[in-house]
Amino acid sequence: MTEVAPRPPAFGVVVAAPDGDWEPAVRSLRTQSLPASSITVVAPTGPPPAPDLRHAPCTPGTAAEACVGAARAAPVPYVAFLHGRDEALPGWLADLARAAHGGAGLVQCGTLRLRTDDLVDGITLTPALDGAAYAVRRALLGAEGRTAARVTVPRLLVRRRADDTAATGSAARAAGTAVLRDNHLTSSVGRSPAAAAGRGRVPDFVSVVIPVRDGALTLPAQLRALAAQTYAGGWEVLVVDNGSADATREVAEKHRCGLPGLRVVRATERAGESYARNLGVAAARGDFIAFCDADDVADPGWLAALAEAAPEADVVGGGLDSSVLSPAYADEQPMPMTEQTDFLPFARGANCAAWKEVLVTIGGWDEHYRGGGEDMDLSWRAHLCGYRVGYAPEARMHYRLRAELSSLARQKWNYGRSGARLYAAYRHAGFERRDSRTVLMNWSWLVLHAPDLARSPNLRRRWIRYGARLSGFLAGSAEQGVRYL
């Protein structure tokens, strides 16, 4: 006998909009895979009459009370809350309903905080109610002393504006705060995110984005490699100049004959690869966007392999091979995605691609990361929004490792700092720091091998790699207020 899946509990939604701006939330609710049973807009003036909308009038000072009252009046077991300018991803209510099955008292999920230009400002994935999107069991509103589960769904299911008013946040939190105050809720974690199925189609047009700063010496080899690509579809190359002081722009312009679709994009307002990539995405004409670096060299089949993987994935990572450009450092070969052990697999920024629609939805590249970690953050946000991050090992990029010790040390130190930032952002989604025994062993190794600095160049390089990264962990821990050693 076939087992019948349990029917999800019905959900109503209260939209807190004391400033009168409720349209974004309501639009997103009408695209939910599990439709809301009722939608109540708490605002000074109501929406136009519609069968699926109710209005609870309020002033800025009475919005919290009106939100609680609207929730109590909803004829459904559960009520979820949004800010008026929130955009709930299509699976938001369905994921809350799955987590609520069994009688949970409060269910919450993470939010993507967006700047006014729609780029990511950060994420909220914490046990605290502040900043989370959530739902409560309606029977607990006004009740006291009951025991129920508080379930956290470790996913980013709502896009939220970072400049929301305090009044909006306070009104939306009121019901959850009351349930937490008056009842005993035991914490648990909901099911892990499931990967989406990808776009299911081939790209119409591909854009290749290359962020570069002072890359006049290495850029020609990469542009020649791109000119030799076997990809038969339509595509373009965008060289995003991040304030170069050398002849980078002139070098790029000279390669227009071999790359008719080449454009140079200025990104001079501030330094940063993520900033340059975001400007490249904004300028791109393609529906599928590939990223590579100016100091690497793409295999002839690189772009074709990424495009071939596109129908089955939302974000695609390719393989990095340092044996050609950095043969002296064989022990530093980047790890394939299939062997990564950090939390969730990630596509490296030096060789990756994504559908433009996906990049826009998850807020693009996070410009807070400088010198590393931004590719892990992008992939992990995609995972936690329900997108699929795939791997195309045939999309090979010849990768150049840092030769100068000062440059290597700076890179590894930045990686360490970014590791602490990633831990602060994703620890409540399952990203675990190293245990105390491992930390002790790593620092002990550094002390015991200090004499390597005066031995062979290879041993000196190895010590600097490890030492700079561990020092970056310390610096990042102090910056983020976490313990990531």
Image: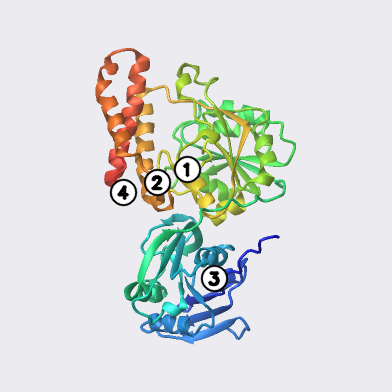
Q: Identify the amino acid type marked 4.
A: Gln
Whether tag 2 and tag 1 are in contact, CB under 8 A, the answer is: yes
Disc assigned to residue 422: 2
- As displayed, is residue 388 above or below residue 232? below
Is any part of residue 267 visible from this angle?
Answer: no
Whether tag 2 and tag 3 are in contact, CB under 8 A, the answer is: no
Q: CA distance from mark 2 to mark 1?
A: 8 Å
Quadrant of residue 18 within the rendered picture: bottom left
Disc assigned to residue 24: 3
Nearest to N terminus: mark 1 or mark 4: 1
* Mark in front: 4 vs 3: 4
Q: Secondary structure at mark 2?
A: helix
User: Which residue is under mark 4?
Assistant: 480
Q: Secondary structure at mark 3?
A: helix
Q: Identify the amino acid type marked 3.
A: Pro
Q: Residue 418: horizontal and vertical position, in percent?
A: 38, 42
Quadrant of residue 434 within the rendered picture: top left
User: Which residue is under mark 1?
Assistant: 376
Q: Residue placed farthest to the top in the image? A: 456
Q: Residue 189: horizontal and vertical position, in percent?
A: 44, 57
Nearest to N terminus: mark 2 or mark 1: 1
Whether tag 1 and tag 4 are in contact, CB under 8 A, the answer is: no
